[in-house]
Amino acid sequence: MYTDRIEIRVVGRKILLKMPKNEADISFIRTIPYVRWNNQGLWKIPHYPGNLIKITVHFGTRVSLLEINEEIENPITNKIQIQKNKVLMIRTNSGRIKLIFGYFTNLIKHIKTIPYCHWDSKNKWWTIPYSEQFEEEIKKFCALNQLKISQEIEVPKKEGIPRLNPSQVIHYKSCPEAYINKLQELRYSQKIIYPFI
C-alpha cells in the first residue's frame, strides 16, 4: 500500500529515514555527504550537526514521526547503551585506550592533541596509547565538560597456546643477575624486566 509518511529516527550517530520513492526527495537526500541506502528500505545519514535540521525543514509537515534516541550501542558488548553525555573508556590488551562516545566536537579536538591517536572508521571509536597521564587528561576534560565517564578493562582472549613457565622448559637458563641490574640501572620499565626475573 502506497503511503506518503515520512519517518525519521535518530539513533546515536545516525539518522534513519523512511520515505516513499520520490525523485525530488531522493535528489535532496543525495546532496547530504556520506548518505547510504540500506537493504531494509531506509536511508542512513550521519547525525552530524545541521543534518537533522536540514532534513526536517525539507520535509516540513510531511514528517509523521520524529523519534530521537540519545543512546548509543556499545559496539564491543552490544549490550550496554551509552547515553549522549557519557564516555566509555576501555583499556585494551594491546596497550591502548578505546574511547566510545556520541558526537562531541570539543572532546574530538582534545583527543587529536594526544600523540598517536587514531579514528577507527569501521568500528566508530577513537583509540589513544595507554598511559596514566593520557587517562587522567581524558578524565579531567570530561569532568570540566559535564561528561560522565565509565571505565572498563578488555577481557583477554583465551585463544592460542599459553606460554610455558620457566619450570616447564627442560634446559631453561635463568637470566644473569648482572643483566637484570643493568636494565634496572638504565631505568627500563617493569614490563621489560619482568620476563627475565
Image (cartoon, grey):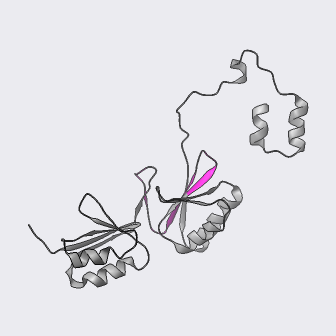
Of residues 166 and 5, the one drawn nearer to the viewer in this rendering: 5
Q: Is residue 78 left or right of residue 170?
A: left
Percent across and percent down for residue 35 are 36, 68
Q: Nearer the viewer, residue 107 or 139?
A: 107
Report x, y in % for residue 74. Answer: 44, 55
Which residue is at the far top?
170
Residue 32 in percent (x, y) is at 37, 75
Q: Which residue corresponds to the image point at 46% horizontal and 50% vertical from the top-left?
A: 76
Compared with 27, 187 (above or below) is: above
In the rendered structure, the answer to whether residue 28 lies left or right of residue 86 reads left
Q: Report if residue 126 lies within the magenta region.
A: no
**At x 81% / y 24%, what residue is drawn?**
174
Count the marks: how many? Answer: 0
Q: Quadrant of the N terminus?
A: bottom left
Q: Is residue 182 above or below residue 28?
A: above
Residue 54 sits in quarter: bottom left
> Residue 155: horizontal and vertical position, in percent?
54, 42
| Relative to 14, 147 lies left or right | right
In the image, residue 94 lies in the stretch drawn in magenta? yes
Quadrant in the rendering for residue 80: bottom left
Q: Which residues are magenta?
A: 77-98
Q: Is residue 96 above or below residue 33?
A: above
Residue farthest left in this picture:
1
Tell me where residue 173 sits by quadrant. top right
Q: Quadrant of the C terminus?
A: top right
Q: Residue at x 75, y 33 (%)?
A: 195
